[in-house]
Amino acid sequence: MLEVRNLSIAFRTRTGLKSAVRNIAFTIKPGEILGLVGESGSGKTITSLGVMGLLPPNAVVTGGEVLVDGVDILKLPPAELRKLRGSHIAMIFQDPMASLDPIFTCGDQIVEAILLHERIDRAAARRKARELLEKVRIPDPERAMRSYPHELSGGQCQRIMIAMAVACKPRIIIADEPTTALDVTVQKQVLELLRGLNEEVGAAILLITHDLGVIYEVADRVVVMYAGDKMEEAATADLFATPQSDYSKALIDSMPSLGHRAERLPVIERDASGKVRSVRPEPRVRPVAAGPVLADGDRPLLELRDLCKSYWVKPSPLSMPVEMRAVDRVSLSVAPRTTLGLVGESGCGKSTLSRAVMRLYKPDSGQILFKGRDIAGLSDREMRPFRREIAMVFQNPYGSLNPRQTVAQLVEAPMVIFADGDAGQRQARVRSLLEAVGLPAAAAQKYPHEFSGGQRQRIAIARALALKPSLVICDEAVSALDVSVQAQVLNLLKDLQAEFDLTYLFISHDLSVVEHVSDTVAVMQKGRIVEYGTAAAIFGNPKEAYTRMLLDAVPTVGSMRGGKEGA
Amino acid sequence: MIPAAILRATRSQPAFLASIVLLVAVVLIGVFGSWLAPQDPFLLDPQSVNQGSSAAHWLGTDEFGRDLLSRLLIGVQPTLLVAIGATAIAGVFGTMVGIAGAYGRPLVQFLIMRSVDIMLSFPPILLALLAVGFWESGVLSLAVVIGVLYIPHFARVAHAATLQVSRMEFMEAEHAMGASAGRVVFTAILPNILSPLVVQATLTVAAAILLESGLSFLGLGIVPPEPSWGQMIGTARGYLGQNPMYVIWPSLLLALTVLAINVVGDRLRDILDPRLREE
């Protein structure tokens, strides 16, 4: 049993102690799953590290107790703590690939974990490892034992991690965003597995996540954190039915949930007195570009015809390369000023497709008609004028901005490349773009690392709009963001679409986001478009089994189509 | 911003300030060494050979009775010219080669990186012996030879760093915006591979001084009676028994200078990186 009493943690800084977490208290009984939910920066990870006794050197516990079966681990000497950690506490991390050792086989790693805690011989440990793999329902456990982590998929690696975590029958399992890196369908299986296994093992599970859907699926009780404070603790059903604190209400509101298509998503705001509330912002009243509606309004802006792109991969070093079709005869069309949502699991080829349209790759065959002209076979030089018209917003706001350039230089870059206007005009345009995406003018002289994820994505959007493009490709543009920030960015994208006459190709694995923004939707599986139609048709009446499976797998809160029965 | 950051760093870090003061002093001595020398550095005095410190010779004398302090002071100039010249040559060309080896067309990449490997497979002293054997020895040819020798080292570092940067999403963003190759190299690649290059440069300065001393020791570097630190260290080894301070003075100066260059290079790397700069 894990009991946390009034835990407060602070960071040592040059100016003194800076409080990170204040008076957190919760109890987890054996066999129970407690969800700890909050935005990034809310202190949930630092709380979990405090519980493990693994705080970074610059963090100090300023008060409180962490009781594991009645023993305060914060007072234990390091050697005792290490022993306790090994035998009583297990951890499951966000990135399963990175937390398994790449140079040992998965089997060896599980055996190692078993031998550390049990006095049995190697052969017995191997048998036990095999049983565990069967328990976590890995297809072909023999092969998984022999495989190295890179030979398995992310979901399989996470199953191995879970097998290792439960191998020594820990009293406490801390799972830090265990399914964030996984696809929806895999996420669902892993969560069910974790829940099912725990009924057997009887550990107290602390599940840390920013995804309310995940909490809804598996947690028994929930602690909501915001800016280092505990906002609320409630049974899962109660939290979603009758949230007590304003923040929980706001958080639940801002989720784009399936089946509740709204024009605007509510966002979380904090007023002057520090109170949090949910606001559903009105569309901004800004001068909408009042240009004449184009005569060819019905003609698609972008049309793909039988687009193919293959990779040649060698299954083993000596074998002949095998063709892998990443994009297989894809045909799509996007009308001007509309949004096409492209959904699919990771590895389905949606990123390859977007980069082929950007002409970062040359497609093998097929046509890409942009404003009626085929750009599939153009050389880099011929492609140049089209680069003004097509812009891209990338997934990772931390990686897509050059860390050595100021925001002004970043946003100005496309104009510099196309020698658009003089320095003064460019600066004026940078100012107006920053205003359009809701950033202060003072941001121009700062570097990207000084901004949060959502603000960085705004910078990336400002850069994409610099040359007044007609098509913007958003490749997982909001999937690295917190729910409430995601809502802000989605609202912004909608505002900008009206203001700048934009057409979006919106790529995402998140069906609820796609439903929220899209006019038409294409579902992609293994390089092919399996279903294609209006958003209402796809989400209201999916025809393909694959689409239905994707929809069912989404962890949803209180939706009619939700995955969890009778909750 | 960057000068201000350097000023702030000198205030908070005494080691950084001391290193800068030392390097400025070394450069000044390099320029004005011949005026600063208290005695004629070439004057032979068979009466006072291999002496320790005294009022007449503050740091003692060498095997021909010449004043050590004076020789150390005028020896700064050739040592510095060779070290900085060699590092500049190696840095500029090595970085260009390395970036081309990672960012050029596949055939270019192959040719460049395999030539670099071939060059790396020879011991530097062997190549230096060969090259200096063909050319007249002197400051310029030494700088060029040592510089060329260290091109592959820079190329390797730049190559690895460029490969790493090439996989970042902002490189894709540059291509998506239609940036030219020149723009990509100068705005996206170079600033982001600067950190390892600065470290490599400080290492190369030190290595060049040492290689120069090795070559001078073999009689291929600075021609006697002109002194250089490396040459003095090499000669002094033969007189360790008679006058141990003879080898210690130039070695101490060399070690201090290299240390100062490393400290400054290390701090500069942090200051040049906006993420690490303390505002």
Image (cartoon, rainbow, N blue to C red):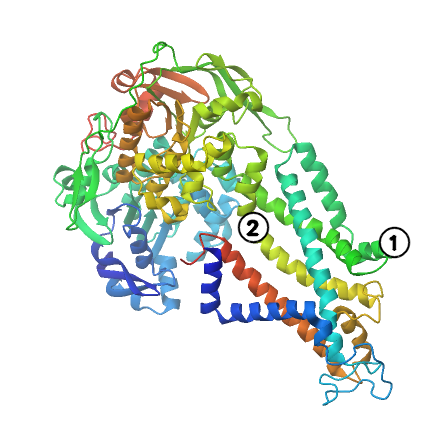
Snapshot quadrant of residue A489: top left
- Mark 1: amino acid: Phe
On screen, residue A395 above or below A362: below
Give the side of residue B216 with respect to residue A279, left or right. Answer: right
Residue positioned 76% across, 54% down in the render: B144
Q: Residue at x 78, y 54 (%)?
A: B145
Task: Please give the residue where the numbered disc 2 appears in the rendered image.
Answer: B194
- Whether B256 is drawn above or below A287: the answer is below
Residue positioned 44% across, 37% down in the render:
A412
Categorize mark 1 by other alpha carbons within 10 Å: few (<14), some (14-19), many (20+).
Answer: few
Percent of width and height locating residue A215: 25, 40
Q: Chain of mark 2?
A: B
As displayed, is residue A229 above or below residue B65? above
Label 1 belongs to which residue?
B134
The answer to whether residue A186 is left or right of residue B236 is: left
Tally the numbered discs: 2
Q: Is residue A42 above or below residue B76?
A: above
Q: Quadrant of residue A189?
A: top left
Q: Residue A278: x percent and y percent?
A: 17, 39
